[in-house]
Structures are given as structure tokens and as C-alpha cells.
Image (cartoon, rainbow, N blue to C red):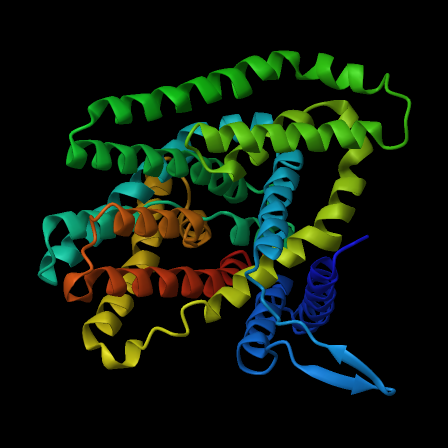
Amino acid sequence: MISTEIFDVVLLIALALIFARILGFLFSKIKQPAVIGEILAGVILGGLGLFFFHGQEVTLFNFPISIPELDYHSSQFDFLAEIGILFLLFISGLETNLSKLKKMEKASTFVAISGVIVPFILGLLVGILLNYSLEVSVVLGLILTATSIGVTVRSLMDIQALGSDSGMIILGSAVIDDVIAIILFALYFAVSLGTLSDAIWVGFKIIIFFLIFLIIAQKFMDKILGLCEKIHLPKSFLSISLAILLIYSFFADKAGISGIVGAFIAGLLIGQNVRSVKIMDDVKALGFGLFIPIFFVWVGSSLWINIGMDISSYVPTIVLALVVIIIGILGKIIGCGIGAKLAGMTNRESLQIGVGMIPRMEMALIIVSVSISRGFLPESGGIAHRVLVATVLLTLVTTIITPFLVRATFKND
């Protein structure tokens, strides 16, 4: 028997897909990114669940029906959303031209490094100017370093710009700056806690991951996929490809790298094989038909997670949040723009790249959460609360504005 709780989640999924598709369509009709409609669907559904539906019971045709709480951050829905972001990065990897990505390797490295250094320094300075301790100021800088590529990738897909020079550099830079942010984070904790061996171990795991799952696997992927063709069962090639996606994501996470980096690399390797055309339509059908809209609904519903935080009574919190959002946006535009110019890109391309690197999400939230749990952000004086609220608002604002900015900067390309 299937439990009642499963059908509660089924209703959540159905509503998420209906709202996401309708609002996505409406935004596309007014020539705006469909992803904004999907995020707005999450905002609406999250609000409905918070303010109106709390497991109420209604009568329909004399039959009592218990309406489940619209909890878009239950463990089951969180799981589906995580699968959605893995699919999004897997598809972007499948559609990426590896030779073109390699050609942009120098530019991506320049953009990633300058796109980490400038926001970090700005965050550090802001913390010091606002009279926070050096420890808290460093955490503020670290929060601003890593880019969340999911929203940008979807926005570039919507306007068919993922394969452009700027799109390739954004993809490459996002992977690199994610790794740099993780290493800086590990080093900071190691120095603060006096455990240099932990930082060395993190760095070693990252090197091993890229050595095994990128360099070595690239040589054997053709043989692996060739063996898959010999399994004469419906969609067997698709099944094995999805298994590779999940395995790469798993080991990327265990190596201390974001699982989405593993998903992107899996797509990148499979996408270079001529057999990948056999699964492209099926992967897109699964991704865009189910999991990816669920991810963006989940992102939108995140607006209401911290609704209980009464920030209106905390002027320092509002000030910190505004400053963090402003430097978070400008830091990436300026930092990544400088790197792009150093790599020989035009002013327009530099702006496109800077805008594409604006979003923050998972790494920023991970850094602030771990910093609170490890005591780097003290609870006394409300410092931990202020930084957490500022980080949440940073992720929400940068997620919402990026699709509009991407469309505007890539217009007429």
C-alpha cells in the first residue's frame, strides 16, 4: 500500500507543475524569462501554504477531504528540487562544446579568480567598516565568493545563449570559483581551528576527484557508453547515463565540491560522445517536464522560510542586508568584468559575464550555516541572526534579478 503522506507530496508536485507552467508561459508571452514565472509560482504557493492551508478539511460533493499542508520544504520536496538542479547542470553539460570550453579556459580562470577576490575583499571591508570582528568580516567575504549557476544556466537556455563565448566563460568560471570558494572556506576553518591537516585533506580530495572523474574518465567514457548499447532493453542507455549523472554528483559531494559540479562534468563527458544524441530529448523531457520546474518553485518558496524573523525591528540587520546585496551584485559585475577584460573580452561581453555570475545560493547558505554552528558567527548581540538574514535576502534578490539582467545584456546578440 502507498502511504497517505506520499499522496500529500503528489498534490504538492501537481500544484507546483501547474503554477510553474502557467506563470512561466505568461512571462514568456511578455518576452521575459520563463524562469521568473516559475520562481514566482513558488512564492505564491509558499505564501498559500504559510497563510491559508494548514491541513484544513473541506467537503466536496458530501465527501470530506483533508487538504494537506502546502509544505514546499518538506524532505520529500527538497529531494525532488535537488534532483532538479542536478538535471539542469547535467543538461547544460550535455549541450556544452568541450573544445570551445577549453578554448575559453584562460578567460574562465581569469574571471573566476577576480570574481572571487573582489567580492571577498569588499565583504571583508564592509564587515570591518561596520565594526564587526575580523572573524565575522572574513565570513561575510566568503559568503560573497561562490556563484550559483543554476538560474543563469536556465536564463541562458531560455534565450539560446548558452553556447555563446560569454555563456561558455560563465559556465567554466562558475565551476572554478565554486572550487576556489570551497578551498578558501576549508583553509579559513583550518587556520581558525588550528587543523591544517583538514584543509590539506579537503584539497587532496578535490584533486583526486578531478583526476579520476574528469581526466581519467574522459579516456574511458566511450568504452563505458559503448557497453551500454549492448544492453538491449528499452531506454537502457538513458538509465546508465542517469546513473553516471548520480554517481558523479555523489562523489563530487563526498570530495567536498558541490554535487552540481559533478552533474555538469558528467553531462560534459557524455555530451562529447556521438551517442549522446540518443538521450538528449529524453533527458530534457524528464528535466524540463518535471524536476527543473520543481527546483525553481522550491527556490521561490524559500522566500517564506525566514518569515518568522522580525527584521523590521533590527535596523542593523536591514543595513547589513542592503549593503551585502549591493556589494554582492557589484562585486561580481566588477570583479568578473575585470577578469574578462584581462582575458581580452569586449566591454559588452565583460558585462554579460559579470551579470551571469551574480546569483548566490547553496554555497552562501552553507557557509553561513556552518559558520553559525562552529561559532564563527556568535549568537550574542544578534550577529549570527543578522548575517543569516542578510545571506537569505542576498540569495533571493540575486536569484530574482539575474534573469532580467541576463536578457537585457544579451539582447540583440
Looking at the image, which residue is at 67% across and 72% down? 68
Instruction: Give coordinates of residue 332: x percent, y percent.
Output: 34, 51
Q: Is residue 7 above or below residue 288?
A: below
Can the viewer see residue 158 in this picture? yes
Instruction: Give coordinates of residue 245: x percent, y percent.
Output: 64, 32
Quarter of the rendering containing residue 76 = bottom right
**Which residue appears farthest toward the front when viewing the image?**
1
Quarter of the rendering containing residue 320 = bottom left
Quarter of the rendering containing residue 59 = bottom right
Can the viewer see residue 159 in this picture? no
Front residue of this view, candidates 342 and 173: 173
In screen coordinates, is 160 left or right of 300? right
Instruction: Give coordinates of residue 87: x percent, y percent.
Output: 64, 43
In screen coordinates, is 199 left or right of 72? left
Instruction: Give coordinates of residue 277: x percent, y percent.
Output: 79, 32
In screen coordinates, is 55 left or right of 340? right
Looking at the image, which residue is at 53% across and 61% down? 299
Front residue of this view, candidates 240 and 110: 240
Looking at the image, which residue is at 24% across and 32% down? 187
Q: Is residue 191 above or below residue 396?
A: above
Looking at the image, which residue is at 44% across and 40% down? 174
Q: Is residue 371 above or below residue 31?
A: above
Front residue of this view, candidates 290 and 347: 290
